[in-house]
Image (cartoon, rainbow, N blue to C red):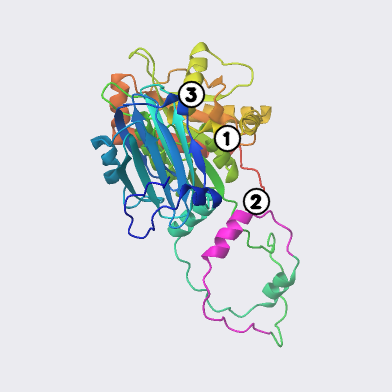
Amino acid sequence: MNEPTLPAHPAAAPLPSRRSVLQAGTLVLLLGTQQIARGATILAVRVWPAPEYSRVTIESDGALVAKQFFVTTPPRLAVDIEGIDLSPELRELVAKVKPDDPNIAGIRVGQNAPGVVRLVVDLKQAAMPQVFTLPPVAAYQHRLVFDLYPAEPVDPLEALIAERLREAPAKPAPAPNPPLTAAAAAAARAPVPPTEHDPLGDLIAQRSQRPGPPGPPPMVATAPPPAEPARPGSRATSTQTDRIIIVALDPGHGGEDPGAIGPAGTREKDVVLRVAHLLRDRINATTVGGNPMRAYLTRDGDYFVPLATRVQKARRVQADLFVSIHADAFTVPTARGASVFALSQSGASSTAARWLANKENSADLVGGINVQSKDRQVQSALLDMSTTAQINDSLKLGAVLLGEIGGMAKLHKPRVEQAGFAVLKAPDIPSVLVETAFISNPEEEKRLRSPAYQEQLANALMRGITRYFAKNPPLARSRSV
């Protein structure tokens, strides 16, 4: 039996036979043949582009069954969806791919056989696709998901370095060496004491250097003048690489997970991302003790990031702080006020804190992760390595943030609360979760939508971060890159 052909591709030959595809080592995945959805209705299709991965989601009123074939040259993913016919909703996928999608070049759909629709996702680069289904949860019904990860994963350190180099001002050419005095020559010959360095800063400095014209030859003193007497308090100085202070900002939810939704339709994921962008600008323009600060966002667009991945990304860049930004919601619209939370290893500090932690920890169910492809034991170990020292530092950070927010907004509780938030479980990074307001309260929702209020929130968070470092200077350490 011959393999049905793909829809025409300008640069692709017809899809090889199934036997040759399997022999070539491509992946074939069969999802739930016992649950074939005959006559299922497609409710919605969505495409979520991001540098880390692009996601395609097909939502339906019944479970879909798909067979996946990945072809490497040119890279493309072919998916046969069984038990349905081509519909206008499926055709919408073609127009939903944006030209700037980092991973997807285009999507083609067609009726491949009676009761079988074929989707072909043409890719811009080699990829590692994951195809999986999600059961109904929250506002979603059944979902068929394609996650397209680049074969070369995005390195968060590389992204941080590239951003810093883009924004760094061009350095002027070095001036010619002035004549050396005897005192200066002696100081230059003096041994330089070892100093703590930051390899991340070294790498940034190294990559920012550009070859230039050769400098003048070194000057040699033939008859130095008499040595000048040393001045009181003077000593030789050395150039030291900046200790870059990295603050990981974690805008909650994203992509398939909208977070809480206010009465007027305001989505938590949109508000917290705007606040995070404003705070990033302030962090990147700030120095602490002469050391530059850099913000790193766990997500920089509208896409979903699993909770464990957010923690992993912050640890990968060796962040000095982790601030997760959210907008709370409750079952009644009268709840109001901002809150700050730290991790607890011994139970929540209140019933409300426990309820909120359970709600936030369910983000992976709503956003959707392929749990079959994850090592659950590794995830569990990562999220259980919290330490008493980390919690104590987190409480200090939370206290100063709460104080600054309280100066410009109403507080829900006057103290830092604690609960078992999965996203706060980095063992070596002070971590807090900030609930900026109750988006379920109509008045607070209106404020959260206001650009002026978002600026005030970003300013308050920036003041709190600066105050924390003033009392708790970042430790001198080497960042492994």
Asked whether disc 1 touches disc 3, contact meaning CB atoms under 8 Å apart, the reply is no
Q: Residue 328: x percent and y percent?
A: 40, 23
Q: Residue 232: x percent and y percent?
A: 70, 61
Q: Residue furthest bottom?
A: 222
Q: Earlier in the sequence, mark 1 or mark 3?
A: 3
Q: Residue furthest right?
A: 191
From mark 2 to mark 3, how far is it between C-alphas? Answer: 33 Å
Q: Residue 97: x percent and y percent?
A: 32, 46
Q: Earlier in the sequence, mark 2 or mark 3?
A: 3
Quarter of the image where one finds residue 424: top right
| Residue denoted by label 1 | 374
| Residue denoted by label 2 | 480
From mark 2 to mark 1, how far is it between C-alphas? Answer: 26 Å
Mark 1 or 3: the one toward you? 1
Q: Earlier in the sequence, mark 2 or mark 1?
A: 1
Helix, strand or loop for disc 3? loop
| Residue denoted by label 3 | 362
Q: Is any part of residue 369 visible from this angle? A: yes
Dot 2, how many residues are within 10 Å of its Cα: few (below 14), some (14-19), or many (20+)? few
Quarter of the image where one finds residue 59: top left
Helix, strand or loop for disc 1? loop
Range of the magenta residues? 192-220
Q: What type is the residue that disc 1 sits on?
A: Lys
Helix, strand or loop for disc 2? loop
Which residue is painted at 32% across and 50% down in the image?
Answer: 7
